[in-house]
Amino acid sequence: MISLANAAGVRIPIHASTHQTIAASQLTAFTAALEAYTGKVFTNHAALHDFSVREYRTFWRCFVQWSNGLLRLAGSAEPVCVGDDCENARFFPQLRLNYADNLLNLSVAAADAPALTACHADGRHVRWTRGELRDRVARLAQALTALGLNEGDRVVGVMRNDEAAVVAALAVTALGATLSTAAPEMGVEAIVDRFAPLAPRLLLAHTMAQAFDIGLPLADSVASLAAALPALRAVVRLDGGTLPGTVHQQIYGLDELLDGGDAERFAWRHFPFNHPLFIMFSSGTTGKPKCIVHGAGGALLQNLKMHKLQFDVRPGDRFFYFCTTNWVVWNLLFAGLCAEASVMLYDGSPFARNGRILFDCADKERFTHFGTSAKYIDAMAKRGLRPRDTHDLAALRMILSTGSPLAPESFDYVYDAVKSDVCLSSISGGTDIMAAFADANPILPVYRGELQCRSLGIAVDVFNENGESIINEKGELVCTRPFPSMPLGFWNDRGDERYHAAYFARYPNVWCHGDWSELTERGTMIIYGRSDATLNPGGVRIGTAEIYRVVERIAEVEEAVAIGQIWQSDTRVVLFVKLRDGHTLDAQLEERIRSDIRRHASPRHVPAKIVQVADIPRTKNGKVVELAVKAVVHGMPVPNTDALANPDALEHFRDLPQLAE
């Protein structure tokens, strides 16, 4: 399937929701409640979004009231927000809450309602009810309290995406401590760069080796990490593995703590709305990672809004996102519990069972929502997988994609090879805001290569170089008004200097996200890549995603990365391609690549140089690291290479003779 334009040049969607889907959606129900609350009528989604950002206090006040049956809040909802500028505003300063208590609220769903299913690579499926999950969280939280863990303490985790990690994470948040996590495949140096400044008191860690592990043995990595954290007092093993004798901290087993914990003795205390909940990090591939602090209340409200209104999560739904504990998506998963859904986890390689493993789980567990990365969808297509021919996906209503822009051809692939009547939503936002700027929408159409809409309650715009709002033109993605999940700041950032420089230095009191984007007249968005990685041949800014969308549909090309090389007082576009096995970049293929880019993008996008390489560096979430490649090409150092999944690939770009001519 492809999106077409009619005779008048109007774009035709690739997918449209049925009247029944629209009527049954949570968004339709909330819109009716907002109309009743305000006395206004929202004739279309554009009007609803405009109100949600123009009258954002009313929008969030109404959302809290509409969600009252799901939430456990103490104190007053007034004032909704103190301040009107993005940089300094704070939401709901008089409210108090317990994040984990809200997710595990037994007055919302019965104790025997499904809460969590963990699918393991070895075929095991662990299933817990809400009552079982809440009991485990309370027991562990009480045991950790008895060990001396207190409100405000930092806890770090090197954890797999399994049921033990969820229990540990929620127990930490239940007692008011602040959590930061990393995935086991990350290098020790990269993890130390993140965790050392936090001075954590407790380390949560998986230690048992698995067949799909890469890098150093996990137990050795955990031991090295523990040795590099001088404030650390204890390590909690989350599985049956062991740690080397070099670990001098007290070591506890998860089962040991659960057995000794008493759920009845644990007090579910309330903490301030802006209590530090999570500390997250940018990728760190071009410098020290940003150390972003997120508040509990903002995370809860924003993520609940995403699940209920943007993702249309309904009671009893089964929400899955393929991710690791290194990715903000893992933290977003938790809000599915507050939305009365059952959260689905997977720990292992996504290409097990000849690439069928995730859809085997989707089939068996009847996923209603399937989240993944754009890279995974592209990899499925290149492997020739056709889940619609091999699996029963009748329950699946929405496929979510993030991590990088989803190519138009990937839209075609999903509707042809996965499911023809699914809502395919490419979203964009991320770690910085623990939310999406461009979001999913269960009632709006899907246009090939475009993100459905701007997120409700988030005043997304696109600015030109002069700070003017533009439509149907490429520019900087910005946010002009505050919203609840904006960071509390950066860790140990005196005077918020680094925080200001990262987001607010370019436009006063306007968040500048760093994405090169376009807002269409339809209200959809197109993301062209990071604005600091845009190409500037002849002084004209173009996005790398425009090149990738053309190149990666060429059968011989497995992956590509484009950079701007400084050359003769200008910048020239250089395209590196990793070809599929058995193919070589000859003159004929090179000319075809250039011809396709000229025809489907523009003459300005045509690279001056095309170079074949054996591998292309990427983050552990599958993002191509353009800035790291650019640094190597220009002879500059690349710090924190441990943040890369394949750091050795950078050597393929060093001192290339093709780039000296």
Image (cartoon, rainbow, N blue to C red):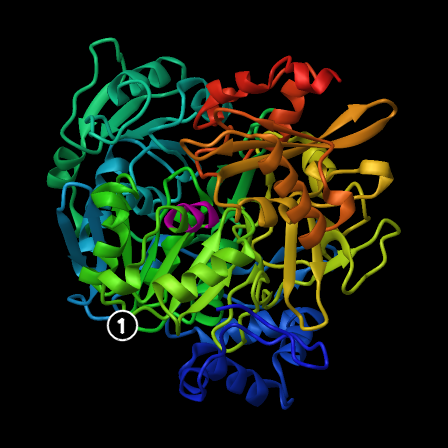
Percent of width and height locating residue 349: 28, 39
Q: Which residue position is annotated with label 1?
A: 394
Q: Indicate the secondary structure of the residue bearing disc 1.
A: loop
- Residue 636 in view, yes or no: no
Which corner quadrant holds the C terminus? top right
Q: Nearer the viewer, residue 482 or 557?
A: 557
**Magenta region, mostly helix, strand or loop?**
helix
Q: Which residue is found at the position 35% from the left and 28% from the top? A: 185
Q: Is residue 173 above or below residue 78?
A: above
Foreground: 175 or 613? 613
Q: Residue at x 27, y 22 (%)?
A: 218
- Judge from the rendering whether residue 144 lies leftward or rightward of residue 496; answer left or right: left
Identify the magenta region.
374-380
Give, as a three-letter code, the residue at label 1.
Ala
Residue 403 against residue 452 in the figure, above or below: above
- Taking the magenta stretch, the answer to whether it contains residue 379 is yes
Q: Residue furthest top?
A: 246
How far across and down, in percent of the image, does residue 292 sit?
56, 38
In front of the other: 507 or 322: 322
> Which percent across, then down, holds residue 167?
25, 45
Q: Residue at x 53, y 46 (%)?
A: 554
